[in-house]
Amino acid sequence: MRPAILNPLFSETATLKGVGAALVRQLARLKLLRVIDLVFHMPVMAIERVQVEQIDESLVGRPIVVNLTVVRHDSGGPRSPLRVRAVDSGGQWVDLVFFGQSGAWARAKLPVQETRRISGRLDRYGQSLQISHPDVALPGEAMGPMLREPVYPLTEGVTNKRMGQIVGMALERAPDLPEWIEPSVLERHGWPAWRAALATAHDLRDEGRAKDRLAYDELLANQLALLLVRRDTRERRGRALAGDGRLTRPLVAGLPWALTGAQRRVLGEITGDMAQSSPMLRLLQGDVGSGKTLVALIAMLAAVEAGAQAALLAPTEILARQHFASISKMLAGLPVRVAILTGRDKGKVRLDLLDDLAMGRIDILIGTHAIFQEAVDYHDLGLVVVDEQHRFGVAQRLLLTGKAKAPPHLLAMTATPIPRSLQLTQYGEMDASQIDELPPGRQPIETRVMAVERMDEVVEGLGRHLAGGGQAYWVCPLVEGSESGDEAAAELRATMLKARFGDTVGLVHGRMKPAEKDAVMAAFSAGQLGLLVATTVIEVGVDVPNATLMIIEAAERFGLAQLHQLRGRVGRGSGRSVCLLLRGGDLSETAKARLKLMRETNDGFRIAEEDLRLRGAGEILGVRQSGEAAFRVADPERTAKFVAVARDDARLLLDRDGGLAGARGQAARVLLYLFERDAGVGMLRSG
């Protein structure tokens, strides 16, 4: 149950005075549905107005507050703006201009021979000074936002003044809450109480410390929730899975290369976890091509050796089918039954597969989200492997783990290197393993940046590459051209390249049917196509060792992590690989920094840290695309600064200060509900 003290914050915006149905709809466009959403709807800047007695030329272009006496109304024609002629105390004339206002409104608000306090930006129009759409108040009225006005993110139909009034009403509902921060942390940073910090953050006076405090609150709630999930997982009784080596030994012995030291180290961590009765919850990080899939396969074989089934969940059908093909190939000759299930499988084939799975005749099931749908029953699910973990919400993950008799072991994999601060905030309930070594024989990829004006040279070079038996990718940011004549589109580029190179060119993008995409990918993998023109659907998992050239058109439009993932599609064999970044002419400073870094390094972790700085956490982890809630106040800089302290504070609360039962724990319980990290701890967002 949510603490009653928070109920005013969780009421709908319609409960605020003067907020009718139309305004509710307008606010909803900004995802402002409840009072608490308004409370955390922070201003981006403040307008500072100068209070003056008299107007002069030096004030043109500046927001001012001044007492003016109304002399006359010039209503003009029906299409003309309403002009109110006024004068300051020194005799300086100024026009107050209103577009779309009636004379009746002016007579009521600005009566002739009356003095009013006027607030707005002073401009020059021809020979006259004027203020357009000023705020008007009686001389004795409180200044309020006239001198200092916070500027909020807005939507069509809601003025900044109206937004300020609505947020002000929301802030009045914010209660005084008990303190949840450890006293020494509070004292060290000199932070105000929660409600005072909120008011200061909206006023934007000395808001740095106030926002630091609010960001810390959010990070503390996040860390506390993740530690509670971790504790809950550790306390559940799962099933120990200790393999006997009868499948893993022959697999490793038959590999054409030895496992790297990093692969052996993380395998020791994973199999050590699986041999315990408390369920494993481990994140496996490894840069593109570091050999994560092999590690996951060995873990799945260990589960099969122990008499259990394993499931591998992939984010796309292309990746699921590729995993199925490569794993089936590696397991050739071993007594292991592998199957694939995607949304495309229908009818008798699907029913037979489901029956085999339920009866234990399938050891490893690979697939998309179809593998955890209601009709899918496992005989004895012991290990779940989730590939590209950040593409799945926790609810999907829990659906799959709910298919097991006892809580299964979970191994989450990602090829998106995650900076330390993000690791703590997004995966803090998991143990982390990292493969930080590439397999032998992998060549570093040479990265070059070229202007799009040199397209003819690039196409000539591509022709020589294809004529020599090589394969290549050409990636575009769009599927089809735009009305503005944008040519960086896969369909347009494929048409142009087919005219030059004929049927050796294939096209794949996200709007194609899965079967069509798979057919093109299969033809490229088999060497029947020389060039694959694509959008970012090839970002993860595509493995064609003979493809040694990657061309990324309009590279400035991609994020760093995305460029790094795309580059990782080449360099998968022993041949020298090149990644060409074709850039447009008008580059932002951020785009220049991205392309420079791509030239300088192949280190995914360095790239991830820089990407976090340039773009923010939500985009790196796919959060904004997947629709899951990002942090409200804790930006990347504050996250990096405070997350480790917040984690220590959360540990201290649980281990020393009596957990959620003690005095500070009761306050922390309010904190968890405030930031909506309370959902039964088992359903908390963790990836």
Image: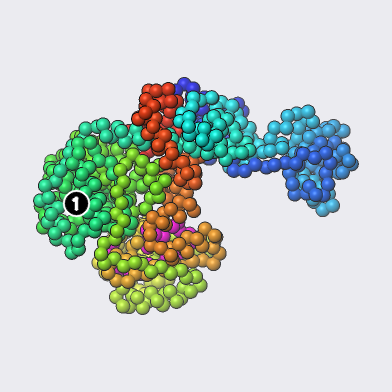
Residue 679 is covered by the magenta coloring? no
Amino acid type assigned to the residue bearing label 1 in the image: Ile
Give the farthest residue toward the right: 91
Instruction: Using the image as rendered, state which of residue 266 and residue 343 is in the foreground.
Output: 266
Give the farthest residue toward the top: 4
- The residue carrying mark 1 is 298
Q: Which residues are magenta?
A: 543-567
Residue 177, visible in the rendered structure: yes
Does residue 380 appear left or right of residue 11 in this picture?
Answer: left
Rendering coords of residue 326 (x, y %):
22, 58
- Above or below residue 299? Residue 16 is above
Rendering coords of residue 550 (x, y %):
37, 67
Rendering coords of residue 685 (x, y %):
37, 38
Which quarter of the figure has residue 139? top right
Mark 1 surroundings within 10 Å by alpha-carbon count, few (fewer than 14), some (14 through 19), many (20 or more): many
Which residue is rendered at x = 41% and y = 56% of the image?
Answer: 606
Q: How is the image coloured?
A: rainbow
For numbered disc 1, what is the local secondary structure?
helix
Which residue is rendered at x = 16% and y = 47% of the image?
Answer: 302
- Quadrant that contains the C terminus: top left
Does residue 2 appear left or right of residue 72 in this picture?
Answer: left
Which residue is rendered at x = 31% and y = 46% of the image?
Answer: 432
- Quadrant that contains the N terminus: top left
Which residue is rendered at x = 14% and y = 59% of the image?
Answer: 253
- Above or below residue 256? Residue 111 is above
Residue 554 is covered by the magenta coloring? yes
Rendering coords of residue 532 (x, y %):
35, 66
Instruction: Using the image as rendered, state which of residue 557 and residue 246 is in the foreground.
Output: 246
Instruction: Using the image as rendered, state which of residue 32 and residue 350 is in the foreground.
Output: 32
